[in-house]
Image: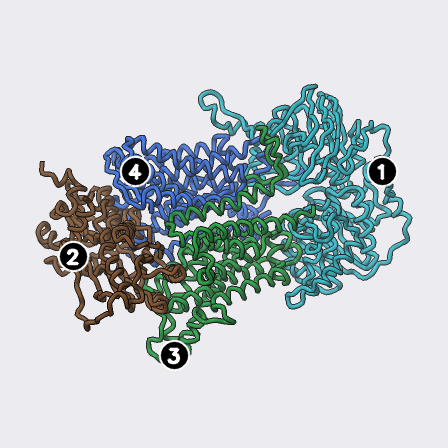
Amino acid sequence: MKSARNRSLAEIASLVVILTLIIIFFSQASPIFLTQRNLDNMLLDITTVGILAVFTTLLMIGGGLDLSVGSTVALCGVVIGALQGTWGILPAAAFAVAIGALVGLANGFLVTYVGINPLITTLGMLSIARGLAFVFSDGLTIPVFDSEGTQFDAYNTFTQFGEGQVFGIATPVFIMFVLFILGLLILQFTSYGRAMYAIGGNAQASQLAGLSVRRYRMIAYMLSGLSAGIAAVLLTSRLYAADPRAAPAMELTVITAVVLGGISLAGGKGTLIGTALGVLILTTLLNGMKLLSTSTDAQNIAQGVVLLLAVGLDQLRTRDINWTAWLRGSRLMPDGTKAIAKGD
Amino acid sequence: MQNTATPAQSKGVIPKIGRWLRGERLTTLNLFVSFIIICIIFASQSEFFLTLENFANIGRTLGVVSIVSIGMTLVLITGGVDISVGSVAALSGVVASILWLNFGVPLFLATLLGLLACTVVGFLNGYMIAIVKINPLITTLASFSIVRGLAFVLSNGQTNQLNDEAFKFLGRGEIGGVPVSLILLIVLYIVFFVVMHFTHFGRNLYAIGGSADASRLAGIAVRRHLLIVYTLSAFLAGLGGIIIASQLASSAPRAATGLEFTVIAAVVLGGTSLSGGKGSLIGTLVGVFILRVLDNGLVQTRVSSFYQDVISGAVLLLAVGFDQIRLKLTSTFGGK
Amino acid sequence: MKLLRKFVLLTVLLGIVAMPLAPVTYAQAQDCPTAKDNYVIGFANLTEDIVFTQLVREGILAAAEEAGNVEIVLADNQLDGATALANADNFIAQGVDGVIEFQTDEAFGNVIMSRFRREGMPVIAIDIPMPGATFFGADNYLAGRLAGEALGEWVNANWDGEANAMLVLELPQSGPIPAARMQGMEEGFQETVNTPVADEMIFRLDSKNTQEESFQVVSDTLPTIPDAEKIVAITINDGTALGVIAAAEAAGRADQIMVVGQGADPSGQEAMVAENSRYLGATGYFPELYGFQIIPAMIDLLECNAVPPAIYVNHVFISQDNICELYSEEWPAFCTPS
Amino acid sequence: MLEMRHIRKSFYGVKVLDDVSINLYPGETLALLGENGAGKSTLIKILNGDYSRDAGDVILDGVPVHFAEPRDAEGAGIRMIYQELHYAPELSVAENLLLGRLPHRQGLLGWMIDWNAAREQAREALKLLNVNIDPMTKMRDLSVVEREIIEIVKALSRKARIIVMDEPTAALTPPEVQQLFGIIRDLCKQGIGIIYISHRLDEVFQIAQRVTVLRDGKHVDTRPIAEMTHKALVHMMVGRDIEERAEVRKGTAAIQLGDRLLEVQGLAKTGAFEDISFHVRAGEIVALFGLLGAGHNILTQTIFGIEKADSGNVHIGGHPVQVASPQDAKRAGIGFVPLDRKVNGLVLGMSVQKNITLSNWSTLAPFGIFRPKKEMHNTRHWVDKLGIRMAGGIETHTRYLSGGNQQKVVLARWLEANVRVLLLNEPTWGVDVGARSDIYDQLEALAAQGLAILIVSSDIEEVLTVSHRILTIYKGHLTGEFMQSEATQENLLHAAAGGTL
């Protein structure tokens, strides 16, 4: 009865344990792992995934799914690169964020008003956005710099997004933290966050309780696109270049991290703390493996195995299994669980 | 019981229109019409589109996606999804070529063992989904990266030649002028059509997708069915991989990248619902045709590959979106 | 034995072109701040997905082992700028002594190099020049030209100097390195062949770096040129070339096509030596030998010895004519006269 | 014939069944009674192998048996009619009826399904209950009630030795209930044992020979029904006395009626209802009574903006309102308690507090930010006022509440949203006796405070008990209006059946 809260605490606790184990392992295996410098690098390295994960969490709690974020990052970056000359770099960056929001809005419209399945919608958008990124850039990486030497201040400001520091923290990391805290506040204290949980938990009931389910959902998709726009600005500013190939398969990394953190694909449950832990687990794992010069293939395999382990263990833990009977070889297995086909 | 009129008995023109609009036949019919329209557009743009040679070409290149789509249709009908098919397809070729080249296993046997490896992967997928009860998207997302990684590790990233006439026959050969892979896919579609419509196994899959609970309570072994479906899906993906390898006379760990997305797009285009319980193999076949013809036509009309991505994505959204809007309209025209 | 042969190859194939440069004299080794007994060198590979770069990696590891006092730290740039930057940061955190950087685009050069410069690390850039780094690698355009010219000459000799159509199997998603190779091939062919192929008969197709995609797009294109009986194809790598040939064979038009490519990997070589091969040949880069040039150069940089700012690899167009001089051991059946 | 001895079962450490024993004789109907959460459902799920038991024995014909899966129980001839509907919406009625046992063809094609035979078998099965539904209709296209009927047909159509019925009549109208009872008696004559679970005690007295009562997972008693009275039975179930409502009601003074808060004029929707006009005054409880499919459910849905009307208009408090969505309805001051609270009413994975405040964010979360103290204060107010009982406080997920308390949470939501008009669809479906009485009390109190309440119900007892005025509806037309004093079972049923009975 009272176990709902305990269970989510247990889930977070088990994530912390996994994270700790990974950290202990790699700190033993590599002397560099726990150095200030490496930790700084790691934080900087997760900004794109981190920013996208915050809003993907919101979206998925509301029962949505967005596979197009990686492509949208690339598209928004290319928009900056393509428009910097004519519009000036800062308006171009602002416009890119708006384009991100627009892509998200289009996703949201197709999902909520037209009623196409989110997986299909964002799969289609993945293809469209990536294609447009290549079309607008002609397939080339566009350097972002003051080619005419007339916008020194503007470019200086722009590069601050990627390279500057705020309160001694790298700007992208700072922005990620701000967005994370914003997300926490939204989920905890605002009606918007409450709406996400309600809609993800039971969209029909929420609709009948008088919530404008469509509008809330649409906003969630828009925020997801918007966050892709923000991530694109930070990335472009950090690399001094806009690449139509940017953020390859980012959507899968983000979803892996978010699901690792306990977000259910069915919606209605999960927390940002869990997501943060999921992102950290994934990135420490990959960072540690990189430090040990592990091949990319092994990293891919490890990523898959960790995902399966985390979700699988969680599944086993939350089930009330009669272990003694199971050990005796009886066919008595789970109980209390319904819905066999559709996971959680 | 003085029961109410069921929709099938209600009278009047408007409900009739509503029923007709809601009908499944129309989804397939719509698809057919869109298919014809796409063909007409391309035929008007490229004089070579409607040539015998091009038909033969489409028949030859249809095999992989259509065969893997069978498995995906089954999986989607049970309410699941299988993201790992592309990786699994790569695995079958890699395993077969390694066994043949490095261990001297006869190629025929090596091919079978390659398929076996895929079947095992499918079984593990099914086990995780049906027994451990992990969400299918998550499970197959994980095996998607694990299996692709395995293919690279096993092959050491190398492309291997599979120069063997008998082996090439599967992907390139012809019987009476008809490509072998086309014959194979027709046979498979007929077999699975019969399975889905005239056997208990097939009907049970619809029932499971419609309501796993109802099926379980009706005494259907839901877990076993799911296990079989994911195993089948991986087996068919492996078969697709073997056809790729045979067509190219080589195997590469990079093969079939992104196949899962093409396949899911084709199946969903064909009217199979991602929420399970609904779909048909005929629709899937039409979906596969549409995507193949679209690609073929875009290449032939020499559209830049950058635009090809945009157009494929847009066609998917348009087709599925149109179907959704049609379903919505039905509620205005005297639906239930 | 194999190593020895590689060294012979090395001396034959790799000409060091030292750019004329204001003579720089360095102090002796004891004054050199970076000189040490043992070195840790970071190598960030372009990608681990293709054979070419895998061979580069293997060569560098082999060369490091041979040098004895060099340990290599590996990373994979995954064809992505952000990943390359993260890897660069990682190398710095790991405190490597020098870096071999193989990344995807010149546009990222500045930001990546700024990190290394701050640390005073010597950098060797493979294939993509980066400001302030020693350049090593292919002149991709020239390498492309070699294949294009060879194909042109073959057409001049066998098809009366005229081809009906040209298939260009490119890799537009993968940035400037493949683009330069493609441009070289195309221009090399068109300038060598007696009658250049008309613009409208040049088909630019996206190979997406997979064999089956190249198979597919060529299969789709062949029906649109039913009358073409002399088709040339220039391809970005061996896998793509094999896809083209497979498509022509499947359409029953293998004898109407001739293909050149880039790379000359084992799989490509196997196709070249086949009977009635439609794979004329490919430009060899000998990526497995890169390391044997790069590692000594890196050690020189670290020990403050003079190193030319750019080291170019000499390319050879490998075909049936010369494969036995280079790889006789690999293809005994073809190279041993019966 | 069947014995379940000393069954124990707990979930997550909570004891759900504690030493429960029942037995069943051939040809007998055993009523299994108890409030929600008493453990009835768990017990029968253990019987059919859906759940495993922690301890105890199941003995069939003197032999201990063990059912690991529902399939095993099927094999032993045990049939279930579940309270919750289980069906595949995209499949035909025939397929759903014959799920898992579609007929085979003969001979070489023995592995194939014989569709003609399947259709015939389905038709036969439907004839059992005289149901006029085409077996090839898709389940999706049936109404909720029709689906419920199919569920019953499904269980009856197979050769069985024991049939367990978990509230089979929840969706049925009295004539249909009688028809079902006729079938049950026939089945008993064939020696089939029936376990009958219901909240409607009058049914139990009609059909059962013996009754077993559970309370809080414990076996209270098993007695022949002849020895029992209505009151004694309720006492056994609830553990305390509950007054007979109707009697209490007759004694209350005349109520104060206010203005017409809800007025419906000429509302029509093709295929559902025609030309509906009525009004509900402040302080009045009006019941809309009809047989299944009469159009009353869809009527309330239309007033609430879920469905769209073709013509007609709705006035709230004397002003015409345009209600195109539930949001509009909420704004206009209409609240709606849906038919299926688990599917349409509650977010089960959210706490009681969050469910209660779900429709009142405009006051509780000005500028989108919640005021936690006020929210908690308001929640407490309604929890106390409506007597919502839960273990673990207002943070408990509504999933763990009993049906009656869940219904109260939905009710509290609309009160919190400060609506003036309340529409309730079958407010006491699956709600046990104690909570039912509570809900009626509350509705009365709310009406007394000036709310206009419209109840849609197919339960004639409920209609007679709670409402001040009763409207009957038949095939989408209003056919009668009765004040409570003049309404009887006979005249209501007569009007609700089109006046031709």
Residue furthest front as drawn: C30
Q: Is residue C291 left or right of residue B307?
A: left
How far apart, in angstroms, are the residues tagged by discs 4 and 3? 58 Å
Which sits in the foreground, B49 or A305? A305
Res. A85 image quadrant: bottom left
Marks 1 and 4: same chain? no
Marks 2 and 3: same chain? no
Binning the other alpha carbons within 10 Å of mark 3 as few (below 14), some (14 to 19) or many (20 upward) gives some
x then y, percent, for residue C90: 40, 60
Looking at the colours in the rendered structure, which chain would you say is drawn in brown? C
How far apart, in angstroms, are the residues tagged by discs 2 and 3? 44 Å
Binning the other alpha carbons within 10 Å of mark 4 as few (below 14), some (14 to 19) or many (20 upward) gives many
Quadrant location, the N terminus of chain C: top left
Chain letter belonging to callout 2: C
Q: Is residue D269 visible?
A: yes
x then y, percent, for residue D457: 74, 46
Q: Are marks 3 and 1 in contact (CB under 8 Å)?
A: no
Q: Colour of chain A?
A: green
